[in-house]
Image: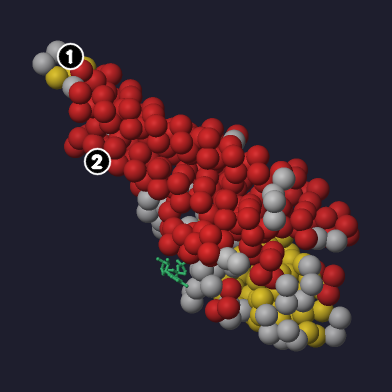
Amino acid sequence: MLDAQIARVCIAPAMIISAHSLGMGAIAAFGTEAQKQKWLPKCCKGEWISSFAFTEPGTGSDPKQITATAVKDGDGYIINGTKRFISNGSYEGPILVFAKDSESGRPTGYIVDKFCPGYTVSEPWEKLGWHGGPLVDCYFENVRIPGENLLGELGNGYPILQYGIAFGKIGMNAIALGTTLAAYEEALKYAREKTHRGAPISKFQAIQLRLADLAMLYDISRWTSYKLGYLANKPKSPSDFAREAAQAKVIVAENSRRAAEIAMDIHGSYGLMEDYKISRIYRDAAMGPQIEGVIDMQKIIIAGEILKG
Ligand SMILES: Cc1cc2nc3c(=O)[nH]c(=O)nc-3n(C[C@H](O)[C@H](O)[C@H](O)COP(=O)(O)OP(=O)(O)OC[C@H]3O[C@@H](n4cnc5c(N)ncnc54)[C@H](O)[C@@H]3O)c2cc1C
């Protein structure tokens, strides 16, 4: 939850850490001992910053639609394709890329050294919120990697994706939780400082009700995030954890968007001015529901688990 405290102040470093943990977490969970020794120490020291690259121009939700390819070439693989909206793609370090393997025809995970020959990135995207956290498209043009960089087994990328994206939601939730807290704190500060006929606007019951809503949204998000962190240490099963992560993501990301709206209402027109911190928080809060699995896809995961069997 350190990431939530960082996000409370500034999302850019929180986003970098969250995405970095996603890449490192997958190598730690699915990598061989040699892969862990090669990639993780420098990542843990922050000398390398990792990435996790699933999304493509054609899809950010459906692994079956992946078009990046990995073709067997002697004892290694040749990777081609474009990965869209990749966090930390412009930093040195490993990138975990999902591509369709030529033998199994199914998504498979490969570890690629960023800035090896054939790897290039776009200019950073100009985002609505989360400014400062770099987001680029990554291009793989005949990138050759040794066979030892295959992560897990051929054709077995889906469980890595499911695991990675589910665990990644711990970081996403931390960011949304920090955003909710920031919205709450800014609203409370403004309600105490802004006066109307000589008294703070917090005297109005309408403002008080909004402050109560903000406190409740924050509390629900906090406990939901803690619960997910607790379950991550002892998941009942990968699919059960994926459902818990999906549920937590919906609750915490939507609470954060709602909290920013309420805090904006307390600010009135002042909230629309860049001079006021809530304008930035409002833009930042719009991001969470749309990334690392959009809200609808989370509900589809939850429903799938409910109806299973
Ligand atoms: C700041 C930021 C950081 C990001 N970092 C990364 C990263 O590090 N790595 C990475 O791989 N990606 C990253 N992304 C990409 C992001 O995770 C995806 O864009 C996101 O998951 C949504 O994918 P999409 O935009 O392609 O949506 P789509 O998959 O095109 O979905 C669009 C809409 O269609 C609906 N839809 C799609 N499929 C179905 C279906 N089967 N059933 C019902 N409805 C459906 C969805 O609910 C959604 O409403 C990042 C994005 C941002 C903005």
> Outermost residue toward the left?
197
Q: Position of residue 305 (x, y in %)?
A: 56, 61
Q: Residue furthest top?
A: 198
Count of labels in the image: 2
Q: Residue furthest front?
A: 309
Secondary structure of residue under mark 1: strand
In which quadrant of the rendered image does the N terminus lie?
A: top right
Q: Position of residue 290 (x, y in %)?
A: 43, 58
* 287 lies left or right of 194: right
Q: Amino acid at mark 2?
A: Leu
Of residue 235 and residue 151, the one placed in the foreground of this image is 235
Picture layout, residue 170 above or below residue 240: above
Of the pair 54 and 303, the residue shown nearer to us:
303
Q: Residue at x 23, y 37 (%)?
A: 265
The three-letter amino acid code for the residue at tag 1 is: Ala
Q: Residues within 10 Å of mark 1 (few under 14, many from 20)?
A: few
Compared to residue 87, the image places residue 70 above or below, namely below
Rendered image quadrant of residue 261 = top left
Q: Is residue 51 left or right of residue 13?
A: right
| Res. 144 visible in picture | no
Residue receiving disc 1:
199
Which residue is at 52% across, 47% downward? Answer: 248
| Residue at mark 1 to residue at mark 2: CA–CA distance | 23 Å
Q: Position of residue 55 (x, y in %)?
A: 54, 68
- What residue is at 71 percent from the left and 81 percent from the top? 101
- Does residue 82 appear left or right of residue 257 in this picture? right
Q: Is residue 100 visible?
A: yes
Mark 2, residues whose alpha carbon is within 10 Å: few (<14), some, or many (≥20)? some
The residue where tag 2 is placed is 272
- 80 shown above or below 124: below
